Amino acid sequence: MSIDDIRKAVLEYDEETVPELVQAEVDAGTEVHEILNRGLVSALDEIGEKFSAGTLFVPEMLMAAEAVQAGLDILRPLLADTGIKPIGTVILGTVKGDLHDIGKNLVGMLLEGAGFRLIDLGTDVDAEDFISAAQENDADIIAMSGLLTTSMSEMERAVTAVRHANTGRNVNVRVMVGGPPVTQDFADRIGADAYGMDAPGAVERARGFVAS
Ligand code: B1M
């Protein structure tokens, strides 16, 4: 049994076996980030390539995502195990029109693990919902994820709305963006305060905000 068996089980959409294999690797003392990146995420990358090549379709992509989510359920307590007083509050969500949530969930787990209070608004989140959640919870950071190229204009709209709320409605929150189509240049251009390249990068940037 190896991490490669986890990858293979995801590629076979085996939602039952993936958590068992992940648990076995955890019990064997394998590093959590190895299980995550070499087992679960690398399988999704392969699924994405096959989707691009037209050799598999949305239902298969969804089944693979469900198998990965089942594996993540095993890793969640290990990534987000914290009993300490929150160091800040983050409002997290995937922008409007975009239903991808695996990367967002990972970012959330690591933020919780780093001691942040997390309010996860889910997917397809409207700009105004980010802003009102930030206001209601006196949040430090709004973190927006987006995976589709078509989500980028919505992300820009949402970041602009947050900046207007900061000046006009006294919200006072920083905004961080991330996801595969997002780059530092794009984040700068749309006026985001930070770009998180990956989940650990998002935590690093978030920590920087509450430290300053
Ligand atoms: Co979709 N999909 N999908 N999909 N899907 C992609 C993204 C795609 C690249 C596949 C491809 O063509 N090769 C492509 C987008 C192309 C583009 O726009 N450039 C695509 C498409 C086209 C679509 C549909 C339009 C397909 C269709 O219906 N014809 C449709 C859109 C639906 C919608 O959103 N409105 C669709 C649907 C789906 C499913 C629902 C079937 C499923 C999602 C299920 C779910 O999320 N619960 C799905 C999946 C699984 C994928 C792939 C295969 C995997 C995505 C994933 O979870 N990756 C994906 C191909 C791929 O990525 N290789 C694909 C693993 C995850 C850990 O990575 O989310 O990148 P990621 O997160 C990373 C970093 O990006 C970063 O940290 C994470 C890890 O460290 N990060 C942040 C993410 N958010 C961050 C926020 C931060 C900081 C860092 O700060 C705030």
Image: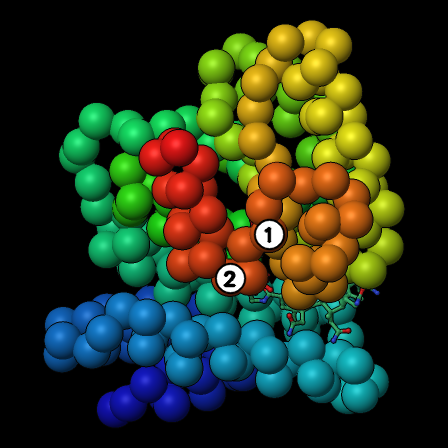
- Residue 24's spot in the image, x, y percent? 20, 76
Residue drawn 72% across the image and 49% down it: 188
| Mark 2 vs mark 1: in front | 1
Residue drawn 61% across the image and 14% down it: 171
Q: Residue furthest left?
A: 28
Snapshot quadrant of residue 25:
bottom left
- Please say whether residue 147 is visible from this viewpoint: no
**Which quadrant, please, contains the N terminus?**
bottom left
Residue drawn 79% across the image and 31% down it: 160
- Residue 26's spot in the image, x, y percent? 20, 71
- Residue 5's spot in the image, x, y percent? 37, 88
User: Which residue in the protein does label 2 denote?
Assistant: 198
**Which quadrant, please, contains the C terminus?**
top left
Residue 180 marker: none
Mark 1 C-beta closer than 8 Å to ligand 1? yes
User: Which residue in the protein does label 1 denote?
Assistant: 195
User: Between residues 60 and 81, which one lies in front from this camera angle?
Assistant: 81
Query: Dot 1 surroundings within 10 Å: few (below 14), some, or many (20 or more)?
Result: many
Asked whether, in this view, residue 203 is left or right of residue 144, the answer is left
Q: Which amino acid type is shown beneath numbered disc 2?
A: Asp
Asked whether, in this view, residue 195 is left or right of residue 23, the answer is right
Residue drawn 18% across the image and 32% down it: 84
Against 9, is 62 above or below? above
- Residue 19's spot in the image, x, y percent? 33, 67
Mark 2 C-beta closer than 8 Å to ligand 1? yes
